[in-house]
Amino acid sequence: MTPWLDSRKPEYKYRRVLVITSVLAITTLILSLTLLIIDRLRPQDSSSLWDHSSYDIKDDPWEYNLSKNNFTISRVPATRYYEWTISQQVTAPDGFERPMLLVNGKFPGPLVEANAGDRIVVKVTNDMVNGTAIHWHGMFQNGTNWMDGTTGVTQCPIPPGQSFTYNFTVANQWGTYWWHAHAASQYVDGIVGPLIIHSPDEPHLDKYDQDLIMMVSDHYHTDSASLVAWYLSTASEGVEPVPDNGLINGRNSFDCSLATEALIRIINTGSFADFKVSVDEHELEVIEADGVDMVPVKVERVPIHVAQRYSVLLVADQSKGGGEGFWIRAEMNTNCFNVENPALDPSVKAILRTSGMAPQEIPTSKDWEESAWSPHCDDLKTEMLKPFFARVAPQADIQVVLEMSFQTITRDRVNMGYVNKTSWRPQLNNPTLLQAVEGDGGGVNSAIVFDESQLVVTLETIQTVELVVNNLDEGAHPFHLHGHIFFVVATGDGSYMPGRSELRTENPLRRDTVTIPPYGYVVLRFVSDNPGLWAFHCHIDWHMAAGLMMQFLTLPSQVKVRKYRWDF
Ligand SMILES: [Cu+2]
């Protein structure tokens, strides 16, 4: 080894490293560019749009226990302000991972709680790839029709990346309501939550020590867009997607501790299934239906269809059962599904315990007898439910007769829902409210002719409307009227026969969502005193997607609209 070689060796090594590094860098660059080009050429994987970062749903077990909220029931008006961000996340409410749409990362979404007379302000930021809107189910929105949150009717979808602030006062109503997306089928994917209005005037306030919300819902393991695409194709032959599971407050198992006398506010936030809710060995005393106080009536099981609400009183009897607590059962009525899902357990259970009952033990309490079951997806018998504040249904000034059906008459042979001859398609960027008024701030568009995809009945003056709906379909359909409470003056099998079907006008049931029996009818009455465009539709999400919806244009001379700039 010579000294000069020794002295040159480090320099030689350095050059070799430099060459190798350069070659590697160039190769990596070429490889990256090639991969990028290949990636751009192949179809984009939509899963990259979904946030996998927060797998766990944010959970506050006390949020739906109203007794823990220190809320003050008061006549002093307040503003309740909420800020919501709706995002897409992969999550697993029942252990099965699926893409969902969550408000503030929660499922179900945040509680909205207010007193009658309060102003509710909710700033909604859309962090999803599709437009959205939030409907406040059961709120009258008298004078604020444009806050009803119904895409294609009262507003354009909130664009991705932008915000819309809902702002309305709650006047002359209280009770149990809920909110949900009213855009495409998004609420099926998780955009739902409770909306509770209190009042010192509630007649049953002194009857309970604890106030709990119990949301029951069906649950799917596939996203709603895929399910709708299948349902509205010839492949489905009109058979609705059958749920994969059932949930109580967004969970498949639920342990709830109760005071001895509790109010349970049952809300069906689902999309298809009718539930029967019961507590082993305890009768439930119904005191509210859809925001209307009732004369208390005891039942063994409460049938509750999509979008309906019942408040029930439960007085826990420690002398019954084995001392480990009782099963609360929410049982899906699978008779109303057109096909079976062998993987589905239709029975969702929660454990009810009061203090002194053995924790960690599985209840041995017994279910009510099978004879209490009705195989049909019927409502509680309307004659059982008497509103606490009695009202006589006013004489009808006009009658509107609707027929709802499913028909396969289009060229593509897809089974679609019809109200009379119209199968509703939302006009997303030109909602009917916008079509009904001219200019900023109001003025009737007297030249308006709605598109043939819209069935709109105009009610020019304040009058009592008798709404007859004949169901020509073999299924039961829970119909909801936005912005109103209606009187249920008749319901029965077959078609309504004027003069032959009995009408109950002496303090009949009042509510906002009623189930029309299979091949049956309902006769409803409501007063057209609320200016605006109001949707009347089946709340089974798949049926609304199939077009089962019509609208009332009420008091057109008073209809207003606020042109809204999106918040940034
Ligand atoms: Cu329906």
Image (cartoon, rainbow, N blue to C red):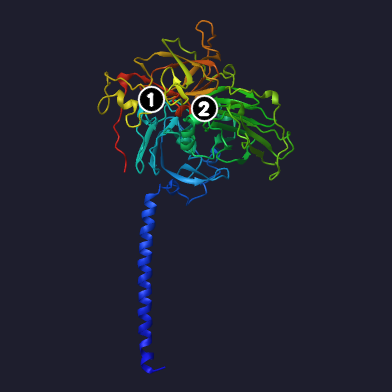
**Left or right of 301 on screen, residue 410:** left
Identify which residue is drawn at 39% across, 44% down.
127
User: Along the horizontal axis of the image, is 220 left or right of 148?
Assistant: right
Q: Residue furthest left?
A: 439
Q: For mark 2, does the 10 Å Cα neighbourhood hold few (<14), some (14 to 19), or many (20 or more) residues?
A: some
The picture places residue 69, in percent across and down from the top left corner, at 52, 41
In the rendered image, the vertical position of residue 345 relative to residue 384, given as above or below: below
Q: In this rendering, is residue 3 above or below 551?
A: below
Return the x and y of residue 456 as percentages of the image width and height: 37, 19
Q: Look at 35% across and 44% down and name the residue there.
A: 161
Q: CA distance from mark 2 to mark 1?
A: 41 Å
Q: Are marks 2 and 1 in contact (CB under 8 Å)?
A: no
Q: Nearer the viewer, residue 233 or 436?
A: 233
Residue, disc 1: 142
Whether residue 220 sits left or right of residue 167 in the image: it is right
Quadrant the C terminus occupies = top left
Name the foreground residue: 7 vs 333: 7
Quick one: SS at disc 2? loop
**Tag shown at residue 237:** 2
Residues 260 and 362: in front is 362
Which comes sooner in the sequence, label 2 or label 1?
1
Query: Residue 17 location in percent, x, y?
Result: 38, 77
Which amino acid is tagged 1? Asn
Q: Residue at x 56, y 14 (%)?
A: 492
